[in-house]
Structure formats: C-alpha cells, structure tokens
C-alpha cells in the first residue's frame, strides 16, 4: 500500500508534467477545436480554393486548364460584371434604409396600448415568412397586367409601369421587396433595445427640457448604439444575400440587368447554361474582396469599442 | 479442361434459356432510372411505360426518380459524376456535348447498329457526336405558329404562306385592337424560337447551323438581315407588352383571352391551351411561312432522349431498357400519351389534330434543327438568348448586341 503512491509520484512528474504544465493553455484550444476545424474546412480552405480555381478554365467536369489571370482579364472587359457590381452597390446602399425605417416603426410601437403585442407580431410577420414567398408576393404585386401596384399608380393618375420587366426599375423593385422583411428585422432589434433604455436618463433629459427629436438624438439613440450596430451588420449581410429574391422575381433579367455578383457567379458556373467554374471563382474572389472591406471595418470598430471609446 | 467446362456450362445455360423461356426471359438485378418528366402528363406516361417494362421483367428491381424539369438541368452534372443512375433523360444535339466530352455518357453505338439506324434515321444525326451515338430518342415534337382560328375567321384571315401575308395578317390583327403574338421571355429561350425560325427562313438551314456551330460571325450581314426582319415585327408592335416579365406559361392567358392571336411555340403548348378552354374549333396550327423565296423550309424539332451514364452500374439492364424505349410499339404508345411524335419510323402517330398537321410537316422538312439552345453550346446559347431578349425590347441596340455576341463567339469556340 505504501509503495503505490511512492511509485506513482516518482513516475508522474516525468510522464505527465508536460500535460500538467500546459493544461491551462491547452484546454481552451481543445474546447475550440471542433469549431476551429469546421471553420478551417468550410470557410478558410474554400477561400483559397476559390483563388486557385479562378486561375483555371474548367467546365466542372473535364480536365482543368491553367490560364493564369485570364479570367480576371475577361472580367475587366465584361459589361455584365459591371452591371452586377453596380447592382451590388445599390443593394448595399439602399438596404440601409431598413435601419431608420425599422427604428421609426419600433418607436411607434413602443407604447402601452391594449393589444400592442399583436401589432408587434403583425409587423414582425414579413421576417418570419420565407424570402421565396416574399419574392412571389411582390412579383404578383408588380405584375404589369393584373398587379396591385399598377392599380395603385392609376389612383394617383400615373401610367402603368412594368417594374420587373424594365431594366431601369427592376433592381429598385427587388430592393423594395427585400426591405419589407429587413425593416421588420431592424424593428425587432430596436424594440428590444428600447426596453433597455434607462428611464432615469429620460427623466433627467426631460428636466433639462429635451423633447421630440432632440430627445431622440441625444438621449435615446446613444443608448441604442449596440442595437444600431447589430442592425447595420445584419442589413449588410442581408444585402449580400439577395440571391433568392433575384432568382425568384426576375431570374437576373431583363437581359441580366437585375443580377448581383453572387447571382452572376451562380449563373456562369452552376446554372443551366453555366460551365465556367474558373470564371465563377474569379467573380467569387472579387465579391470576397468587396466583403473584406466591410469585414475589416467591422473588426476595426470592434477593436476600437473594446479599447473603450 | 477449363475451357471444356466453360463451353459445356455455356451450352447448358443456353439450353436452359431455350428450354425455359418463361423463366429466363426477365432481367435480373437492379435498374436505377432518373427522369426529368415532372409535368403531369409526361410523368404519368413515363410511370406507365416503366411499369410495362417491369411486367416484362418481374425480377428486376427498378428504382425510378422523377426530378423537377428545371432542377434536373443543373443536377445532372452532379449525379453523372457521383452516384450515377443507370438511365437518365436528356436532350439531343449540342446539349450532350459537355457530358460527352467529359466522358460521362456511355457510347451506345452498338444499339444503333443494324436496322435501328434506319428506323431512327431522322434523329441519328442529332444523337451523333464524334461519329458515335450517345443515347436514344423517345420523342420529338414540332414547332410552329399556334393561332386562334376563331379570331382569324372573324377578321377574314387565312394561314400565311409568305412574309408579306404574315405581316399583312398581323397588321389587321393589330388594327382590331389585339396583339399578333404572345410571348414570355423571362426565361429567354422563347425568344430563341423566334430567332431560329427567322434565321432559318431568311438564310436557310446551312447558315443557321454554321452560326450555331460558331463558324460565322454574328456581325455578318446575313445575321443582320435576320434581325432586320425581326425588327419589322417589333416596330409594328406585334408582340404583347411587358413580355420580359412572363414565363411561357404566363404568356398563355393572353392567347386564351383573345388579347393575342398567335403563339410561336412547341407542340407542348397545346395541352395547356386546351385546358384553358380553346378547343380544336378555336385553336389551329400553321407552319412558319417562307421569308426568302426559294429557301427550302427547315423546322425546329427538339428531340428528347434517354442516355446511359458512363458510371452506371447496370449497363446491360440499361441497354435493354433503351431497346425497349425505342420499340415501335412502345413509341406509339408513349407519344400518344405525351401528345408528341414518335421517332421510330414504324410507329404510328396518335390521331390528334396538331400531330396530324405536324407529322407530315416534319417529314417534308428540308432538315430538322434541334433548337437554338441545343444546337449552340450552352455558354453561347445563354449570351445569345439574352441578346435576343434585349433586342426585342431595345431594337436600337442591335449593333452593340451583335458585337457582344461576336466577342463571346471568339472566346467560346476556340
């Protein structure tokens, strides 16, 4: 009995000391490992793979042919690419309207009236239904022959407009459809944010004579900053995810005027007539670089906030 | 010794086959079939055909998988490369090319040897790439102008035989307040139907084939002549407004309601038009009229086909199934149900007004084209059809569009 602990204590330091010494620092890594591995395999690795494929001409079936930067040169001369890029920028800019719109609705709904919970859920409803359904509903709404939209234009004496068939309006038409659920999303974020607003500060503001917009700007909004930041991030992500609406409402048309980069990438590489994997990958790389701007901004802002500004 | 044993075994097997035909006639093992026939009528037809094949081969384990027709077009490259079925539907012509080039379709020239080549002669060329056949056809159908006979009669119009009559009719229809043609170009290919016919009639079959094969420049004067003819119709206002918003199905109600008098379409449009309430007294068909006098009339007649993926596991069963598909009797039966035309020359055509008009038209045709997106390679088809759609809305941009197509042609056909 007495020899046992002696023997083990004499052996332990040499065998288990490394583990003992590093336990503290290793445990978090072990805990993180599943997430890190999946992140590497499904996010980081495909990024480099896209770079790699973009240097080839490949139909996805046969052998690959190395073409260097030719796919990028093609992109440079491709009008359709610039149309998609322009639309991407339009999406990113106009989608931001969801934030003030969501705030306005949230402020409006932030009151105690009988049945307010019902109204809140009704306003949130568009975010719950699928984007595909939103797309279908809006394409019927816009339908040039029997859609509500042209009937409504008629009430105010305007001529009918074929929103989804006219290259001048098509992107705006789809963005409006996308704003409908996105506004609801921002609204819910602000509603939760408003719950956390400190009533004492409002009281203090009132004593100092702040009212209306002044109150909103100087007292309420600063307290809503976390909500604004999240709304900003989800809206950018939403704008870059516009694929499903475009696919449902116009299929990229008329003559490709409503495409965004993600849709164009799908079309050249994976759709019915698309067999250009390398070209698609080149578009993906460009899209990735554009998104990097936002990601960099996001990281920079996070770092700055953590330093306590 | 060994060879002795082998031969005797083989002999035994043969006698067994001969002696017990009822027991040995069925195929053994498995057969996995992927179909794109997701519309109601074709779906029922195919299921019925497979059940007849099953009756003949009671021991065969058949697994059928019907995939949505549009989704199938993108899924095919996945299932051909991984987990391939034994039989798959697809289309003839250049649509096969990427899969043939990648070695994903089985060479089935052996099935075509002998009399089958004669019986299926009309489509042999469309099934042939590199001198080999890569599948078998089960059906084809005519394209042409489907029109509202009652409207034509009311306006005193006859079926046009040439371009002037065609345009003359159209002008009268426009004067009556309707549009001449309905069309929905949201998914682009409907516009290619118009280009096919205008080009076939203006410049002839050979030129059209050279163009889709990339041998002629898109900026060629002959192509411009085709577009000029098209522009005449566009400038008249012959097509319904806002066609860029509609699919081909969504364009049907214009014809059913009488807002448009005709539709350039494939024969598959007849079924939904009948469902919409147009019976044979109201709906009729005419061939696309001559444009340049003296050019022999060629037609679009897309062929639907069955193929064996190169990675199929049960190729013998698959070959037996393909043989069954092309049998004259079977083709008579399935095409009667599909409302389309059988390819086998020994088959008979169902007694249907439109098939009765279409069948002799195709038999007399100078040549048969598949369809623009099956004759041209996929990339070129996509870019060109987008150009056609744009041209139908903004005919003034013709030169810019043709230049764009020409640049694409130089890149695609190397």
Image: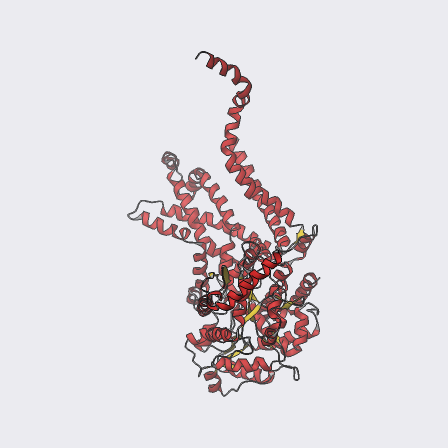
Q: Is residue A48 visible?
A: yes
Q: Where is residue A18 in the image (x, y as percent from the top left)?
A: 55, 22
* Image quadrant where one finds the N terminus of chain A: top left
| Closer to us: B217 or B57 | B57
| Residue reaching furthest to the top | A2
Q: Position of residue A129 (x, y in %)?
A: 41, 53
Which residue is depicted at the point 51% across and 58% down? Answer: A247
B402 relative to A94 in the view: left or right? right
A93 relative to B282 in the view: left or right? right
A10 relative to A141 in the view: left or right? right
A300 relative to A1 in the view: left or right? right
Please tell me whether residue A275 is drawn above or below residue B245 in the rendered image: above
| Residue reaching furthest to the front | B1
| Residue reaching furthest to the left | A114
| Closer to us: B20 or B379 | B20
How many numbered marks, from 0 up? 0
Asked where in the image residue A59 lies, by quadrant, the reply is: bottom right
Q: Where is residue A133 in the image (x, y as percent from the top left)?
A: 43, 57
Q: Is residue A250 visible?
A: no
Please tell me whether residue A221 is drawn above or below residue B36 in the rendered image: above
| Residue reaching furthest to the bottom | B156
Q: Position of residue B138 (x, y in %)?
A: 53, 71
């Amino acid at each position: 009995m007495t020899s046992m602990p002696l023997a083990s204590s004499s052996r332990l330091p040499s065998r288990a000391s490394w583990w003992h010494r590093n336990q503290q620092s290793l445990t978090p890594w072990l805990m993180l490992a599943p997430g890190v591995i999946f992140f590497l395999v499904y996010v980081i690795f495909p990024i480099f793979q896209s770079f790699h494929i973009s240097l080839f001409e490949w139909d996805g079936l046969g052998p690959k042919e190395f073409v260097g930067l030719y796919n990028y040169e093609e992109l440079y001369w491709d009008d359709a690419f610039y149309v998609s890029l322009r639309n991407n920028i339009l999406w990113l800019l106009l989608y931001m309207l969801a934030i003030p719109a969501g705030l306005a609705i949230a402020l409006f709904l932030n009151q105690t009236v009988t049945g307010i919970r019902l109204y809140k859920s009704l306003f949130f409803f568009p975010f719950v239904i699928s984007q595909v359904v939103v797309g279908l509903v809006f394409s019927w709404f816009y339908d040039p022959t029997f859609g509500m939209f042209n009937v409504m234009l008629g009430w105010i004496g305007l001529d009918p407009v074929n929103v989804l068939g006219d290259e001048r309006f098509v992107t705006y038409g789809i963005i409006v459809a996308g704003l409908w659920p996105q506004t609801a999303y921002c609204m819910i974020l602000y509603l939760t944010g408003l719950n956390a607003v400190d009533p004492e500060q409002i009281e203090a503001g009132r004593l100092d004579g702040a009212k209306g917009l002044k109150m909103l700007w100087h007292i309420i909004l600063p307290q809503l900053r976390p909500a604004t930041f999240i709304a900003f991030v989800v809206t950018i992500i939403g704008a870059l995810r516009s694929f499903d609406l475009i696919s449902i409402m116009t299929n990229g048309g008329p003559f490709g005027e409503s495409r965004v980069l993600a849709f164009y990438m799908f079309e050249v590489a994976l759709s019915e007539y698309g067999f250009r994997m390398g070209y698609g990958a080149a578009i993906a790389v460009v899209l990735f670089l554009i998104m990097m701007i936002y990601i960099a901004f996001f990281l920079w802002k996070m770092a700055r906030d953590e330093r306590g500004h | 010794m060994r060879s002795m044993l082998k031969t005797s075994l083989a002999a035994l097997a043969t006698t067994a086959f001969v002696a017990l035909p009822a027991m040995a006639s069925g195929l053994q093992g498995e057969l996995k079939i992927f179909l794109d026939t997701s519309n109601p009528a074709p779906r029922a037809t195919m299921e019925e055909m497979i059940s007849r094949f099953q009756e003949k081969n009671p021991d065969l384990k058949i697994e059928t998988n019907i995939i949505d027709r549009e989704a199938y077009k993108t899924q095919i490259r996945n299932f051909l490369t991984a987990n391939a079925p034994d039989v798959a539907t697809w289309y003839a012509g250049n649509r096969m090319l990427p899969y043939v080039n990648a070695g994903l379709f089985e060479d089935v020239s052996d099935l075509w040897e002998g009399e089958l080549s004669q019986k299926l002669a009309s489509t042999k060329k469309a099934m042939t790439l590199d001198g080999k056949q890569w599948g078998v056809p089960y059906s084809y159908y005519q394209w042409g102008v489907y029109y509202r006979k009652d409207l034509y009669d009311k306006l005193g119009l006859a079926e046009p035989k040439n371009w002037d009559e065609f345009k003359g009719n159209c002008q009268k229809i426009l004067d009556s307040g309707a549009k001449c043609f309905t069309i929905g170009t949201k998914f682009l290919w409907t516009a290619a139907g118009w280009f096919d016919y205008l080009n076939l009639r203006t410049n002839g079959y050979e030129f059209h084939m050279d163009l889709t094969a990339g041998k002629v420049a898109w900026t060629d004067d002959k192509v411009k002549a085709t577009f000029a003819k098209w522009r005449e119709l566009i400038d008249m206002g012959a097509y319904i407004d806002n066609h860029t918003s509609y699919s081909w199905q969504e364009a049907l109600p214009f014809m059913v309601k009488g807002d448009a008098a005709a539709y350039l379409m494939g024969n598959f449009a007849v079924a939904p038009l009948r469902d919409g309430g147009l019976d044979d007294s109201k709906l009729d068909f005419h061939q696309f009229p001559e444009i340049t006098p003296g050019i022999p009339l060629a037609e679009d007649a897309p062929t639907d086909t069955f193929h064996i993926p190169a990675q199929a596991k049960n190729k013998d069963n698959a070959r037996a199934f393909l043989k069954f598909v092309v049998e004259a009797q079977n083709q008579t039966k399935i095409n009667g149900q599909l409302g389309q035309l059988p390819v086998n020359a020994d088959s008979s055509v169902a007694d249907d007004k439109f098939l009765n008009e279409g069948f002799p038209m195709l038999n007399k045709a100078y040549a048969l084209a598949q369809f623009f997106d099956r004759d041209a390679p996929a990339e070129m088809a996509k870019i060109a059809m987008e150009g056609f759609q744009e041209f139908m809305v903004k005919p003034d941009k013709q030169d810019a569009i043709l230049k764009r197509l020409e640049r694409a042609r130089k890149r695609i056909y190397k």
